[in-house]
Amino acid sequence: MCLAIPMKVVSRNGGTGVVESGNVFYEINFSLLPDAVVDDYVIVHTGFAIQKLDKEDADETLKLYREMENLGIDHE
């Protein structure tokens, strides 16, 4: 099972760009979400931005992931 995780858009160059979460950066494809801009939070799944979400929802989701890690639950 794969989880889609929220990440912050740090750069865009046409249909691709870079997102960040926890000081880890990934180059992803924005063809499914062309209106995403720098500083948006997006859900990333298998290298594609699939949905925008607000900062509060992103922060809450990332907080839950950190809590799972602290409990030893593998979310990958």
Image (cartoon, grey):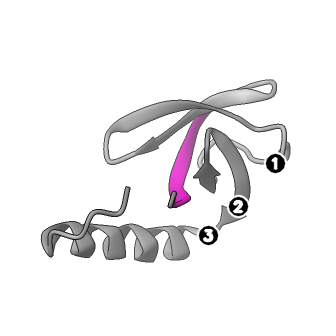
* Element under disc 1: loop
Identify which residue is drawn at 60% across, 50% down.
Answer: 44
Query: Is residue 41 visible in the rendered structure shown here?
Result: no
What's the amino acid at mark 2?
A: Lys
Q: Does the stretch in magenta take in 15?
A: no
Query: Residue 42 at what x, y percent from top left?
Result: 63, 55
Q: Which residue is mark 1?
A: 33
Residue extending farthest top: 13
Dot placed on the residue nearer the N-terminal end, 2 or 1: 1
What is the magenta range? Answer: 3-11
What's the amino acid at mark 3?
A: Asp
Q: Which residue is mark 2?
A: 52
What's the amino acid at mark 1?
A: Leu
Q: Which residue is mark 3?
A: 54
Give the label, 2 or 3, closer to the camera.
2
**CB under 8 Å between discs 2 and 3:** no
**CB under 8 Å between discs 2 and 1:** yes
Foreground residue among 70 and 39: 70
Quadrant housing residue 29: top right
Query: Residue 72 at what x, y percent from top left?
Result: 15, 69
Identify which residue is drawn at 65% across, 67% down.
Answer: 53
